[in-house]
Amino acid sequence: MRAYSLDLRERVVAALEGGMSRSKVSTTFKVSLSTIKRWLARRRNRLPLSAPPPSGRTPIFSDMDLAALRSRLQAAADASIAAHTQWWNDTHPERPVSPKTIERAIARLGWTRKKRLSVPVSVTKQHELSSASASNNAMLPIS
């Protein structure tokens, strides 16, 4: 979910400071009462009205790291996750990672191990396969 714009936040707080009631501001700007309370608390504590930075852990792989990993995947498409992990840990000894981390980064790149679309067997090929199995069955002794 995207954060509300700073412009909207400032207009809501300005309307409240101008004397408009919280319920009227809520319906006018289509913002919940709890959001209005949170913005007023930020103003009261002299914090900026802008959205706080997202919480959570910073990603291990930067965009440059992902580009390097993508080039490695293109160069060694058949290598296993363990081989890619070994390559990463050998080339980046200051930041070793686990196989699961490499796996998540590969998924983040949208890279798959399957390299071609599966297509159904053609009609000609099906006919060849069925006639071959029929001739094999003809050679079997009947008991």
Image: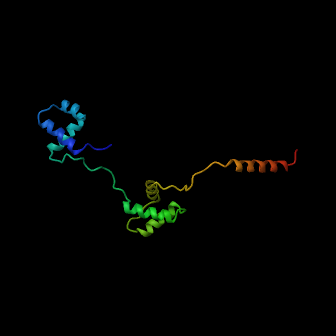
In the picture provided, is 57 more to the left or to the right than 135?
left
Which residue appears at 20% of the width and 37% of the height? 37
* 125 and 71: which is toward the camera: 125
Query: Picture quarter containing residue 41?
Result: top left
Which residue appears at 14% of the width and 39% of the height? 14
Q: Can you give x and y, in whole percent of width and height, for residue 103 in the image?
A: 47, 56
In the picture provided, is 91 more to the left or to the right than 137?
left
Which residue appears at 50% of the width and 60% of the height? 81
Count of number-bearing discs: 0
Q: How is the image coloured?
A: rainbow
Q: Quadrant of the N terminus?
A: top left
The residue positioned farthest toward the left in the image shown? 18
Q: Quadrant of the C terminus?
A: top right
The residue positioned farthest toward the front in the image shown? 124
Q: Can you give x and y, in whole percent of width and height, for residue 87 in the image?
A: 47, 67
Q: Is 46 drawn above or below residue 60 in the view shown?
A: above
In the picture provided, is 127 more to the left or to the right than 67?
right
Q: Can you give x and y, in whole percent of width and height, for residue 51 in the image?
A: 24, 47
Q: Is 26 drawn above or below residue 139 in the view shown?
A: above
Q: Can you give x and y, in whole percent of width and height, for residue 9 in the image?
A: 20, 42
In the picture provided, is 82 more to the left or to the right than 119?
left
